[in-house]
Image: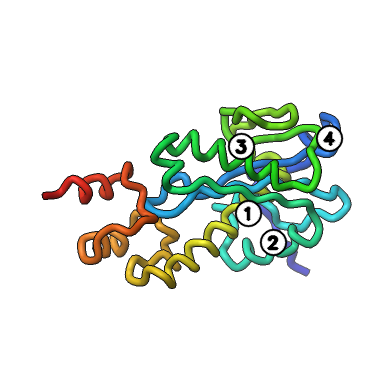
Amino acid sequence: MLTATRPADIVLPTLIRERLGPAPVCGIDEAGRGPWAGPVVAAAVILDPDAVPEGLNDSKQVPRKRREALAEALRASAIVGIGAASVAEIERLNILGASLLAMVRAVAALPHVPAHALIDGNRLPSGLPCPAEAVPGGDRHCLSIAAASIVAKVARDALMARLARRHPGYGWETNQGYGTPEHAAALDRLGLTAHHRRGFEPVRRLCQAP
């Protein structure tokens, strides 16, 4: 019987860091820092160690259909909070500041305050109600952060699909607001919407065009 193997140098996320500190621990990650349009969305996830869905990983490494199934499984087995920062907040705070704000809101959306938070990246948001640790590349190392990356990505993709129905032509249902050729052509053809981030290129150029 054939069995699936993986290269020895591929390291999958684990619960090692979650088990080092007091429980419960939430993982936090965001989605949508790079797009030309739409909010940035963050998720905070407290996993049940006895009911961790198989296949959690950095959301960019998981196919869309599998991400959606994992997000549904996480909503059933884990404690999930979601927060967002609007385009206006992105323009006022910059994308990093808005991402950190969305993370704080995601933790605030949890039904109770976690004892500790593990956050993807090298920056910690201010205003968290618990001690926190920044984990560069955390979505590749910590299962709770990987879970948060999947929940945030699926939530934001669904939001952009809803916005696409209100603003057809930009392809947001497939490009999620990122700077694809289709999106660039639509900006030239249709102009800006209230959901475009005017600080991003080529959106800025279009705003400055005579």
- Residue type for callout 4: Arg
- Residue type for callout 2: Leu
Q: Residue at x 77, y 46 (%)?
A: 46
Q: CA distance from mark 2 to mark 1?
A: 7 Å
Which residue was labeled with disc 4? 19
Q: CA distance from mark 4 to mark 1?
A: 21 Å
Q: CA distance from mark 2 to mark 4?
A: 22 Å
Residue 88: x and y in percent read 42, 45
Q: Residue 119 sits in which quadrant?
A: top right
Q: Nearer the viewer, residue 127 or 71?
A: 127
Q: Residue at x 81, y 58 (%)?
A: 77
Pointer 2 local density, CA inside 10 Å: few below 14, some 14–19, many at least 20: many
Residue 40: x and y in percent read 50, 48
Q: Residue at x 37, y 68 (%)?
A: 167
Q: Secondary structure at mark 1?
A: helix
Which residue was labeled with disc 2? 70
Q: CA distance from mark 3 to mark 2?
A: 19 Å
Contact check, label 2 and label 1, Cβ < 8 Å: yes
